Amino acid sequence: MAPLDHAVELLDRSLSYTRVALNHVTDADLARPTPCERWNLGQLLAHMEDALDAFAEGHHGAIDLGDLTPALVRVQNLQRKACALLAVWSRPAPPTVRIGEYDVATEVVALTAALDITVHGWDVAQAVGADLPVPARLARDLLAVAEWLIPATGREDRFAPALDVPDDASEEQRLLGFLGRDARPGMSVTKPKVKLTRNRHPGGATGS
């Protein structure tokens, strides 16, 4: 399988997983804490929507994330953009993508999207208390991507330090532990530093 074909296939599985997680979100959940320490669920959904726009290189005009957005509207936007993202990546693509001053291999962008979408889908599931583990094969494939894309050290501005996991850890625990998340039951969601009650744009918050 060609590198880009593999990346798109992984992206397809990532989107399928995360769309199930999104189905659990309600308005009452928007202020809930998430495994991303600086974001509540409403802010995480806003970040995810922004990320889908970036990954699709969409030009949708201005997106106002300053006001309270009902969960149904946010989830519908994400579901729609998830479908559009897969459609975009299912078409022929150029060999490289220009990002700022750099040319990046196109499959790297698709692999990054698959990793980002899956992990934040897991974050959503944790925030709403949904029992939705990352499928073992998807977690195993994404761990290889994460280890390739993300340095083990010097990544504090974007990711929490990797956690040690036991030798008998599941594929999900290995993936999430590498990304600084504790996938043991009841261990993943931390209280936010500040109580957040509105769905605001995450602004300058660092990646998670």
Image (cartoon, rainbow, N blue to C red):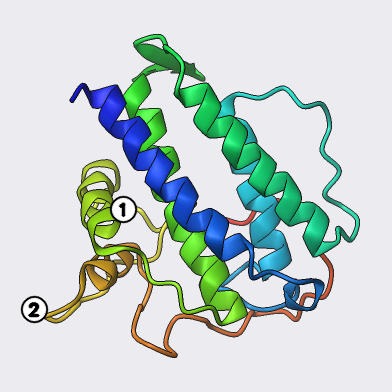
Q: Is 105 situated above or below 178?
A: above
Tell me the distance, in whole angstroms, between the alpha carbons under discs 1 and 2.
25 Å
Name the residue type under label 2.
Answer: Asp
Q: Which mark is residue 154?
A: 1
Name the residue type under label 1.
Answer: Gly
* Residue 36 point in image, percent of width and height: 54, 68
Q: Which residue is mark 2?
A: 167
> Do we see residue 157 in this rendering?
no
Q: Mark 2: give few (<14), some (14-19) or many (20+) Cα within 10 Å.
A: few
Q: Is 125 situated above or below 148?
A: below
Quick check: 183 left or right of 205? left
Q: Quadrant of the N terminus?
A: top left
Q: Nearer the viewer, residue 62 or 22?
A: 22
Q: Mark 1: give few (<14), some (14-19) or many (20+) Cα within 10 Å.
A: few
* Residue 71 point in image, percent of width and height: 79, 63
Residue furthest to the right in view is 67
* Residue 53 point in image, percent of width and height: 64, 34
> Do we see residue 151 in this rendering?
yes
Q: Is 40 situated above or below 104?
A: below
Q: Of tags 1 and 2, which is closer to the observer?
A: 2
Quick check: 72 left or right of 86? right
Quick check: 168 left or right of 157? left
Q: Secondary structure at mark 1?
A: loop
- The structure residue drawn at horizontal position 17% and vertical position 77%, both measured from the top left corner, is 169
Q: Secondary structure at mark 2?
A: loop
